[in-house]
Image (cartoon, rainbow, N blue to C red):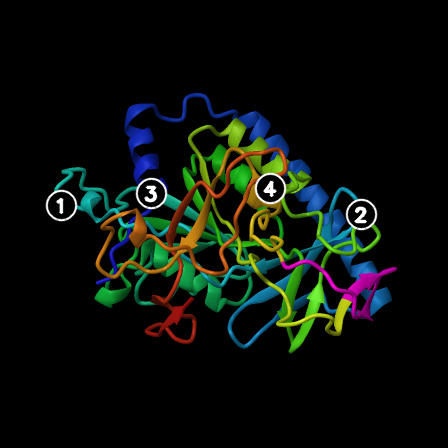
Amino acid sequence: MRLRLGFGIGMGVCAIAALGQTVTQSLALMGLAEESARRSSLQSEWVRRAARLSGEPIRQEFPDGSIIEWVGFDQAGWPFYVQTNNRVAAISVNTLPCWPGQVSGLSLDGTGVRLGIWDGGAVLATHQEFQGRVTLGNTGSSASHASHVAGTMIAGGVSASAIGMSPKATLRSYNWSNDTGEMASEAAGGLLLSNHSYGRVTGWNFSNNTWYWYGNPAVSESEDVAFGLYDEAARVWDTVAYNAPYYLIVKSAGNDRNDRPASQPTQHLVRVNGTWTESATVRDPDGGNDGYDSMSSYSLAKNILSVGAINDLPNGYSSPSSVVMTAFSGWGPADDGRIKPDIVANGTALSSSSNASISSYASLS
């Protein structure tokens, strides 16, 4: 059986019992929700106009279930793309002792707890693992990645090997189009924890059998300066968290570390004057030669929980040497010196619910 329970969920439940939400700034959060919705609408319109001029698709979905979407522009006016992080153990931590009947005596299984998920599409709410415990905040088709992550969070255990972290919790599902505004609104209504297994596409990325480099060559030809940068997206998430002090935003660290072509120079595409243009310029691996400084944007927010991925521990933790980082999971620090990620968890070969049918399962890594 795969043993996992949300670290943040357990802490969130304890916070409910001990403190409640007495200092949540609901008016500030609702104001932020309205402003974020307005900004999201403007960004979407700017993207549509730019895409018409360049002929570039706004959204791409790939056979492995991953999604890349052009969602806006950053504070410097550079295109901002987001991508699902397919290694999806963003909040899976082995805390089986917190479950009912276990040694801790806490009996935490998610009963009475409402969670949130933002992802590249909707969760298949009718899957047998959810038993009516998923509601959809947006319309749209289901996505394999979102359905898989949702199973990691709340699958009821119809398949014992795919039981979720909080098998009796309920889940509210949103796509990422207006994530900040919806997060603020839900936090004002008492949401305590949400999962975000996606992030900004930064540096090297391989898709459609082609290498792309997402950095701004006018700023640096070798390194994507978005790595390590505390940007506007991170700042706004911190604002949500500041105004909702018992709401925990759980975010994957990203999968960028060591991304690069096998050898250089190699032909790839880079954005120049609004158009993807062929280049053979030699550029740094993501994170440089040592892998550090390979996290970006939301993952570097100060008031959230950023989670890196380690190799599976089939026999559980035995010593520090048994914990081995995956080759892909992002490392800090942030440019301002803060250590990231905050914690690590299993990030390989996770079996969970699939959107292929109401009784399908898949293993993603």
Residue tagged 3: 7
Residue 127, compared with residue 219, is above or below; it is below
* Tag 1 residue: 102
Badge number at residue 89? none
Question: Considering only order in the chain, which callout, 4 or 1, is on the residue closer to the N terminus?
Answer: 1
The answer to which image quadrant residue 313 occupies is bottom left
Work out whether mark 3 precedes mark 1 in sequence or the reverse, and give the earlier one.
3
Q: CA distance from mark 1 to mark 4?
A: 38 Å
Of tags 4 and 3, the one toward the viewer is 3
Q: Position of residue 8 (x, y in %)?
A: 36, 41
Q: Earlier in the sequence, mark 2 or mark 3?
A: 3
Q: Secondary structure at mark 1?
A: loop
- Of circles 4 and 2, which is in front? 2
Q: CA distance from mark 2 to mark 3?
A: 37 Å
Q: Left or right: 308 with respect to 63?
A: left
Reply above or below: 307 against 50: above
Q: Amino acid at mark 2?
A: Gly
Residue contact at pointers 1 and 4, CB within 8 angstroms: no
The magenta segment: 270-285
Q: Is residue 123 visible?
A: no
